[in-house]
Amino acid sequence: MQHWIKLLTALAVSATVAVIAAALALATGTTSRGATVKIAHTPLGRILVDSKGITLYDFPKDKGTTSSCYGACAALWPPLTTKGKPIAGRGVRASLLGTTKRKDGKLQVTYKKHPLYTYIVDKKPGQTTGEGSKLFGAGWYALTPTGVVIDKD
């Protein structure tokens, strides 16, 4: 009887660890597959969004594919990271998707060589509250499906 209790306890612990690992992967926006970039219709027009429909932003202060957003900047504007080749959703040009290595070794998704970020204030699909913000030394702008920044200023 004691053997069965130990076995069931071990199985319960294993299942709990697996659930926690899956939850962490979902919470950080990364999985063993590539991050998905999609298109959404918003008041700004058609823009790039992540797999959850959250707006993706460009930070013109970045130099080419090299991110300049770390620390407090990355806490407010989390980079879209991936563990595999990014996946193009319907309407997204796969040829414009890429990655760049961040200082911490993580791969950040790029589009037309722009590193992509979300904004922690955008909680619901279609929100674009970060559009035009002037934080951390430059503006933040949503991108069209062709990779052009939307600058409504």
Image (spheres, rainbow, N blue to C red):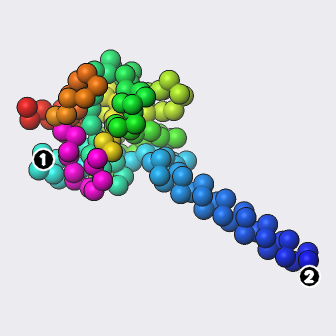
Q: Which portion, as a residue range, is magenta?
A: 121-131
Q: Front-most of 4 and 96?
A: 4
Q: Is residue 94 magenta?
A: no
**Three-letter code, disc 1:** Gly
For disc 2, the marked residue is 1
Q: Quadrant of the C terminus?
A: top left
Identify the secondary structure beneath mark 1.
strand
Depth check: give the residue in front, 31 or 96.
31
**12 sits to left or right of 112:** right
Q: What residue is shown with label 1?
A: 45
Which residue appears at 72% of the width and 69% of the height?
A: 12
- Picture disc at residue 75: none
- Count residues near mark 2 (Cα–Cα under 10 Å), then give few for <14, some for 14-19, many for 20+: few
Position of residue 14 measured from the top left corner of the image (x, y, whole percent): 72, 63
Give the left or right position of residue 15, taking residue 32 as reference: right
In primary-sequence order, the first of circles 1 and 2 is 2
- Image spot of residue 152 (x, y percent): 8, 35
Q: Is residue 27 visible?
A: yes
> In the rendered view of the protein, which quadrant contains the N terminus?
bottom right
Q: Rounded to the nearest whole Å, what is the CA distance between mark 1 and mark 2?
A: 64 Å
- In the displayed structure, 56 sits above or below 62; it is below
